[in-house]
Image: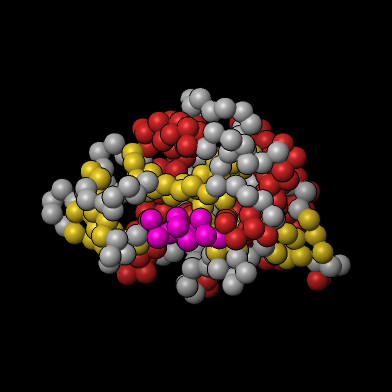
Amino acid sequence: MEVLERQKSWKLLTLEALVKRLPENDGGEFSFYKDMHVSQRKGYGGEVCVDQMWNEMNIPNPYYLFHGFETVNRAGNSHQIDTICLTPQFIWLLEIKDIGGRIDIDESKHQMIRTKQEGVIESFKNPIDQVKRHAEFVKRKLRDFQLNLPVEYAVIFVSDYTIIGSIPKGAPIFHASGLQTELDKLFNKHRESSLSSPQLEKLKIELLNMHQCKQWKAKVDVHRLRKGVLCKSCDYKSVMKYEHGSFKCVKCGFKCKAAYVEALSDYRYLFGEWISNQGLREYLGVESRHAIKRIIQKINLEQTGTFRNRKYRIPDFLSFDHKNNVESVKKDTSHR
Ligand SMILES: [Zn+2]
């Protein structure tokens, strides 16, 4: 049973907003963040791909899946564990890699080398070190909770075309297609339950409580970012103007009532969560106070302060707490 659904990371959401709003003639800075965005998006796509494989697997009940688990340890450093599979017999931590070419891991040098088909060689963080670090953290946590549960870990390569070359003997590294087989092996290795039913439930809740997404800020001068509601149909190259209750692209004429939602989401990740009425009007390019009031009411923005000091909080439109907002926005979009 899936208890934590994967969400886009703060970093990916920020980069998505950034590549839309950084002026392209910025040269180096634009291409730097564009490349970072491509690589983050690829990683996310690979993780989602593996998540879907769990739906077809045979797993003895009860079990809990946490996708995209993030937490912060005592030293203030973060642990991002791609997937956790919690069972009464063991807890399994997975590091998911979507890297093509040939992979070789040299344990003595703690490095992973990727050789592309055309012969280009690159060095990456050793994923075994990464997942071992998570395992040590989870072991410490289990001790804190006074639970005695075996901790297992593995590194999974998403693409069947990745060639897994020389790796340390017995290292748990395999293609995603081997997920079921490797899981079966673990159930064979750990036949006895180490947790009672209440202990399993308690641990599930503790893990969910520990989950906390790490914020990420790009090192850019935000004053230079493009403002306004940008047109999706024009690949965000042109702005949309507000007229008669809807946003209309000045270039292609595409109309969308709810186009401001994406613009507000960009604001949240690039500038901050809180915005004033004046700030909203300037950012969205809506002159009418009444129109802005209607928008605020429609998405039911949380507010603080009074009169001139009033500020509105832009919610995370993509998080599950705001499903209702997204639903109403979808309805709006379909009426365009
Ligand atoms: Zn357009």
Quarter containing the C terminus: top right
Please name the residue shown 57% across and 51% down the image.
Answer: 69
Q: Quadrant of residue 276?
A: bottom right
Q: Nearer the viewer, residue 94 or 200?
A: 200
Range drawn in magenta: 128-137
The main secondary structure of the magenta stretch is helix
Horizontal arrangement in the rendering, residue 161 relative to residue 184 (left or right): left
Q: Position of residue 29 (x, y in %)?
A: 37, 69
Residue 236 seen anywhere in this rendered image of the structure: yes
Q: Nearer the viewer, residue 173 or 271?
A: 173
Q: Position of residue 288 (x, y in %)?
A: 72, 56
Outermost residue on the right side: it is 306
What is the total number of numbered labels drawn onto the structure image?
0
Horizontal arrangement in the rendering, residue 273 relative to residue 180 (left or right): right
Q: Nearer the viewer, residue 181 or 229?
A: 181
Quarter containing the N terminus: top right
Q: Position of residue 307 (x, y in %)?
A: 85, 67
Please name the residue shown 16% across and 57% down the image.
Answer: 120
Q: Is residue 157 above or below residue 229?
A: above
Please name the residue shown 28% across and 50% down the image.
Answer: 169
Q: Position of residue 97 (x, y in %)?
A: 37, 48
Residue 284 seen anywhere in this rendered image of the structure: no
Q: Quadrant of residue 264?
A: bottom right
Please name the residue shown 45% across and 43% down the image.
Answer: 47
Q: Is residue 287 above or below residue 200?
A: below
Horizontal arrangement in the rendering, residue 36 relative to residue 21 (left or right): left
